[in-house]
Image (cartoon, rainbow, N blue to C red):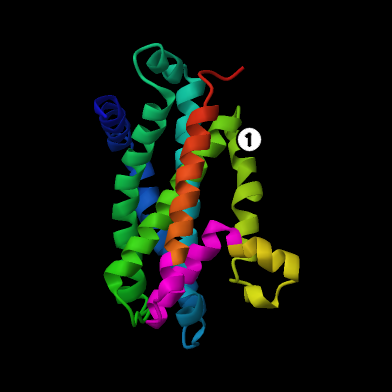
Amino acid sequence: MRRTLATTGRVLNQVRHDPRTIALMLVVPSLLIGLIAWIFTDTPAFQRIGPSMIALFPFVVMFLVTSIATLRERRSGTLERLLSMPLAKGEFIFGYAVAFTMIAIVQTIIASSFAVWVCGLEISGSFWLMFAVAALDALLGISLGLMASAFARTEFQVVQFMPALVIPQFLLAGIILPREQLPGVLESIGDWLPLSHAIDALSDVAAGTTDSDTAFSMLVIVAWIVVALLVGSLTLRRRTA
């Protein structure tokens, strides 16, 4: 635990000296949510897709930032030096996850508050439950980003993981077309993808219809986070060949 927290502190210290990255992580999701709300001004569309946007944009931003930051650690040789010390791969991965989770919590507070109090998204359920689901969703982006970085050799390859891991989830999550209207096979796949459950849970909170299905969706997200972090720690390479 001490080495994990030391990794967390080192990552946060690095991020602290990069104000542009901080601004991008904290502000961009809110700006994109605001743009969507502006596009659908005077229509009920934003009320329907607003919860999906709270799930989508922080997820994508944290996936990209985390995957590229971790890959740079390996390409610069920092990871090789760290793992030559008494630091396990799991401690490195979890240290990174904790650091970016702390940033994601701030990002989630800003994005959720902006959607509700600036863009006018009406929430019938608990705001804090919406915040909890959104934070889990951001952590999901972090964990998948860490897993993707373990398989990539360059920043270009990391970006290529986005069409493989993120865009299919977007297409099958029910944002464009309700999942029950998709072909049977695609509906079944979409039902098990984590972004679908994040959107379902946020939509339940927004509509004030939270029930056991909402809790199940949150459990599915947690399961994906755990699996992604385990896979990322088990497959992490010390250096890029």
Above/below status of 21 relative to 29: above
Quadrant where the N terminus is found in the figure: top left
| Residue displayed at 47% across by 88% down | 42
- Please indicate whether residue 60 sits to the left or right of residue 12 in the image: right
Question: Measured along the vertical axis of the image, is residue 233 above or below residue 84?
Answer: below
Q: Residue furthest front?
A: 212
When the figure is inspected, residue 67 is found, relative to residue 103, above or below; the finding is above
* Numbered label tally: 1
> Between residues 185 and 25, which one lies in front from this camera angle?
185
Q: Quadrant of residue 183?
A: bottom right
Is the residue 227 above or below the residue 6 in the image? below
Residue 119 lies, in percent from the top left, at 37, 76
Which residue range is magenta in the image? 192-215
Asked if one can make out residue 64 in the rendered structure from this viewpoint, the answer is no
- Give the residue drawn at x 55%, y 28%: 235
Q: Quadrant of residue 127?
A: bottom left
Q: Position of residue 178 (x, y in %)?
A: 62, 76
Q: Secondary structure at mark 1?
A: helix
For mark 1, does the 10 Å Cα neighbourhood hold few (<14), some (14 to 19), or many (20 or more) residues? some
Q: Residue 55 lies in magenta, yes or no?
A: no
In percent of width and height, residue 233 lies at 48, 31
In the rendered view, does 71 fall on the left or right side of 126?
Answer: right
Q: Considering depth in this image, is 162 or 189 the residue closer to the camera?
A: 189
Query: Residue at (33%, 62%) from the top-left corner?
Result: 132
Name the quarter where the C terminus is drawn: top right
Identity of the amino acid at label 1? Gln
Residue hosting label 1: 157
Residue 195 among magenta residues = yes
